[in-house]
Every structure is written in structure tokens, then in C-alpha cells.
Amino acid sequence: SPGLSSGEHLEPPVFVEPLGDCRVDEGGDITLRGVLAGSQPIKVSWLHNGEVARFGKPSLSGGGEVTFQVTECLPEDAGAYTCLAVNGAGKTSCCAAVCVREVIPKKRADSGRGATLHFENPPQQLKVKAGQPARLLCLFSGSPPVVSCWIRNKEQIADGPELWTENADGSSTLVIAETKPQHTGCYTIVVRDRKSSAQHTLTLSVIERPQPPASSPVISRVSASSLVLSWSGPCYDGGSAVLGYVVEVKKGGRAVAGDWSELTAQCKSTSYRVCSGLQPRAEYCFRVRAYNTVGASEPGPVSPVVRMEQKDSAKLREEEAPLAFTCVTIDSSHKVTDQYILQEKLGMGKFGLVFKLTHRETGRVCAGKFYKGRRAKEREAACKEIELMNYLHHPKLVQCLAAYDHKPEIVMVMEFIAGGELFERIVDDSFEHTESASVHYMQQILEGIAYMHEQSIIHLDLKPENIVCVDTTGTSVKIIDFGLAARLDGNTPLKVMHGTPEFVAPEVINYEPVCLATDMWSIGVICYILSIGVLTYVMLTGESPFLGDDKQETFLNISQVNVDYSQDTFEGVSSLAVDFIESLLVKNPRKRATAEECLNHPWLNPLPHPHSHPHLHTRSASSLDEPETSHSESEPESPAPSPELDLIDSYLACPGQGGLKMGRHAFSFGETPFPTRPEIQQELIC
């Protein structure tokens, strides 16, 4: 009897009962049937007029019977149908003709029934938790009869126990009984009536718990009662963005039996400062879980065991010791590992990696900034930064201690600054931030910038992330990241195409020449933030003065100097502090206070220097609304920011940060006039 044999010798497939021709009226159903014999397995496929048959349901039974069913036939379903059968011994085919007799529909009073076939508010995306069923429902309207099919990866989806379609008048639903990660992807529904066809693609996202963090926590800044943990995020977020991390601790080390305790379940970044619950000289280890909307991951790798320092240790920290300034030349005859021991990774960025280093002879802890240097542009940027830093020997500026060139890599050995970002210090509940503290921070920042400006060097990327604390307990700060710094030449105007939108000056947005006053605008924004709890606009007020809902609104706010000086915003902030900020947030660079003038402002210096600016403390907010002249007298007033400005993500990987952290967005122009996206160069903020 006909069937499928499975002996040792493979038999090619053969149709023992061929397909039969069919005739059907429009709207009727047909079933093409044949019987195959041959060795298993046999793969069967169907063609309609030489192309893959989409509208129909194929089947192959264990007895060798093959069928292809087409329901609600339309005239377009007529033609030649071919069944192809293939196994390891050969292949065969069989054809049948299908004739569909067209039925002339009766005229209907309701002309709307003849509307063009279209989808009605089809879904664009569906998210389902792994293990739950999914129903992809699409509603459509057209002239009956309407047939439909679902396609994924260019293949028609056939009904089965795990996945099937449910069709009704005006709708089609693809049902997945139990979703799995492999079901994530794009699904296309194709519908067709007598007049036309239409298709719609939607995305199914099957989300699950994220994978554990990829690395064990790195421990840094250890004291008697606090430390900082840093780690890498999970390799896969489960299809849904990671919302945060759960940090756990166990006392006594990994080998000691005991339960894990939760330190926090609300950590929003890949670093966490543990500042309570730790005992001097005790041993601890840590682990981290990632979580998203579905739930928390399994624990990540356990950290090495750390022993806390002894309380009130009299040991003098290296970072507090006076620094001997060094004029650095690039050493191409040695490797950095000849002089330094390479330790754990502190961070990473587009330029390369940052590692903790220990000097082999002195034991001094440093940070090594490893530039990739594969391209000439990367090597040029590294050499330029080293050259500029030889002019920046000041206690408030981070120092370059050595440099090595082992091609293609260039390594800068930097001061190791263990205190972390000033921004983090200010928002830390364990530190009390006051206006007098803001004064102290601003004095230090201005001392460093004043020295830079004396050397005709502008920083061009001043922002909270680039002001760091020398240690975890003191109030000394330093300025870091001179990767975008430049030396001004009085004969050649400099125009730049990079920065961080919230902190750049109007002349940067309008692509006008920059000057020393460009840094002073950024200092004004920093001070605004510090004034209410975070840096100067941000230090005193705690919020960014120009940040809009999108980059264009931010640029417009800066270009128009839209600053809120209301009493509600500056509640509890002195009038001198407000006056100080007003002296900096001035559109015309020539009218901004200089670093020296700021240091003599009554807010910072109650007893000003005899040569201090006589009008700084009498400047009114209304002066900001006066017409401003361009930095270049020959150029007209700049228009609103170009709509083609682009934002680029940047990453912060600074010495002492202990891990990779996402920084503020930075923008970069291309060549003038403003370019399309592919021409924009990403700037690394480090």
C-alpha cells in the first residue's frame, strides 16, 4: 500500500496518487490532494504560478497524504499549483490546475461596503512577558470575501499546537500559546479581497528578567566605614530596559556561611557608595542583581573580599600630599608596565580604557588612560592633550604624570582622584550642602580656570561631571578632562563643534568664534545649579537653567538667555549669589565677567581686590534683555540654532570613578554648514 518507507536504502519521493484539477465558484473552498511514497524525511512545499503559495494551508500526514486547502477563493487564486517533494535521495513534483468561476456581485444599496481594503488602527508593537500567551489582533475592512495570512522571516506561518491563526469577518489573530524569547521579532499580516491587497507589520517583544550583571563589583575608595562599588551591566536586558540594581552584602567573606543582606534596591546606575552599616577592620563581599519591569535577575558574580580600614587611621593619603609638577614627554622606549603595575579597570570610553596603576618603586596609586591610537586622528588628539597639560601645572587642575607610546596605543598616567564627582557629593544625603560650601567650591574652580586662561587655554567642556573631589571626606576639588581644551591664537579665530548642550555658550551654538569668556558661561550654569543644591546655576538652585524638553528647545533657551531668576527658584539664596550668576549668563561674551573679576566678586570675596570690577555687584537682570552684539563685529546677530544640530551620547570614564558611567548628552557639529548625521564626529567626554 502507498506510504513512506524508512529502510536502509533511501527511496526518492514519488507521487503514487497525483494531484487532481479543481473547479470552484468564487467564494468557495478547494482542497488539492495527493499521496507520496519514499524514504523519510520528505520536505514538501507549494508553488502558485511559479511563486511561493501564500494563501492556503498545507499539510502532510504520516501516511504520505499531502493537501493544500484554499478557503474563500478569489479569481486571483486560479492558476497552476505545484507540490514539490524532496528527500535525501531525490525530488519530484506534481501539478494541478485550479479554475475559479467569477461571480458578479449584486448591487448593494450601501456603497460603503465597496471601500478600499485597509487596516483599522493596527497595533505597531506588543510586549509580552515570557511564558504568557500572545494575541496579535489586526482589524481590517474591505469587500468580502477577504482572505489573510501571517508571515515571518519571509515564510508563511502554518497552524500548529504552539502557534495558530484565528480568522473572522474583518479580523485576523495570530495566537502564540506560550511566548519564548525566540518569538521576538516582526510579523506581517497580508490581506486580500477582490479589488486589492494590503499588509501591515508589527513587532512582538517577548520580555523576561535581565541576565545578571556581567562582572563582579569592583571595590574602591575604601575607608573605615564606607566604600564605592562599581560593576558592568548585564549582557542582555531581557528585552526591556534595566530600571536599576539591587546591591547585597555578606559579612565575613564568601567562604563564611551566612545570609545576604540587601543594601539598596533602588540603585539607578552601575556604581553605589556604601556609607553606612560597615564596621572598621571587618571583612565583606558584595553582589548585584539587575531588574527590569519583569523582575530581578539572578545574582551576579561575587566581589573579592575587602577588609575595611582601621578607624581614625593616621595614615596620610597620597592624594592629599603636595604635588610636584612634572613636564611630561612621551616615552616611546618603555612600556607603562615597566614602571607601573596594571590593576583593575576603572572605566571605558570611545578613546579606550582607564585602569588603576601602582608605581612599582614608590607604590603611588595613579590612573592610566589608554588611548587606542589606531587612527592618526586619535594619536594626534592624545598628543595634543599631553602637550596642553604641560602648561596646566596648578593644584586645582588634574595632572599628567607620565606618557608612554607603545604603538598603536598611547598611555597617559594621571593623578588618581578618589573622591568622585562633585555632583554626587552634593546630592548625597550624608553630606550637608550650603551656600557657603558653594562659595568654597566656586573659588577653587575659578582659581583653576583663571590659571588656564592666563595660559590662553580654554577648557570648552566645563560641566558638573568634570569637577571631582580630591577625597571622600574633604572639600577640595579639581578640574579634569582636557580632551576638548584648546590654546587660543589671537590671529586665528577658533570655532568649535562640540560641547554639552546644557552648558555651552550661545557663541558655540551659533558657530561663532569662541574666547576665554566661553568657559565663563559654563561656570555660570554650573554655579546656578550649585546654588540650589547641585552646581553654580546647578550648585545653588539644583536645576539646569536652560534644559528644555529636547535639544532644539535647549539651544533656543541658551540663544535667548531664558533664565529664571524668580524668587521661587532662588528661595534661600543670597542676592549676591544671584548677582554673581547674572554677571556670567550674558549673551555677549565681551560683557561676561572674567575669572579674575569673579574671584573678586563680593559673593566670593567680601574684601575685593582694589582692581576688582566696579560694577559686578550692581548688574541687573534686565541687562540680559538688552540687544547684544555678535562676538565678531563684522557678523550679524546669529539666528536661532540650526535645526540640524545633532546630539551624541557621551560616556564618562574618569580617574577615580571606579567604573563606566553614562554622562550627559554631548552634541557635535559637522563641517559648516551644519551636516547630515553620518558626518558628525562623536566626542568622548572623559
Image: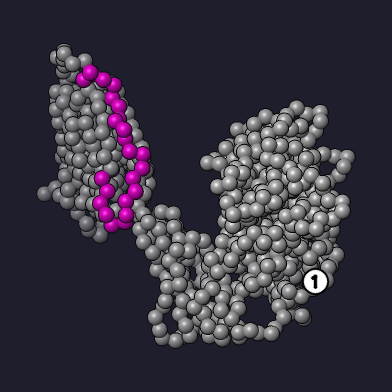
Farthest-out residue, left: 1
Q: Is residue 168 left or right of residue 283?
A: left
**Mark 1 nearby-residue class (10 Å; few <14, some 14–19, many ≥20):** few
Residue 153, percent across and down? 37, 43
Residue at horizontal 28 percent and vertical 25 percent from the top: 117
Q: Nearer the viewer, residue 370 or 401?
A: 401
Residue 331 seen from this side = yes
Above or below 344: residue 254: below
Q: Nearer the viewer, residue 58 or 197?
A: 197
Residue at horizontal 77 percent and vertical 58 percent from the top: 605
The boundaries of the magenta stretch are 112-135
Above or below 263: residue 670: above
Residue 100, percent across and down? 18, 23
Instruction: Name the residue that disc number 1 marks.
Output: 323
Q: Is residue 357 left or right of residue 1?
A: right
Q: Nearer the viewer, residue 345 or 181?
A: 345
The colour style of the image is one colour
Residue at horizontal 78 percent and vertical 40 percent from the top: 591
Q: Quadrant of residue 511?
A: top right
Q: Is residue 575 magenta?
A: no
Q: Is residue 121 magenta?
A: yes
Residue 426, percent across and down? 60, 62
Q: Amino acid at mark 1?
A: Leu
Circle 1 SS class: loop
Q: Nearer the viewer, residue 571 or 358?
A: 571
Residue 16 seen from this side = no
Q: Is residue 4 left or right of residue 200?
A: left
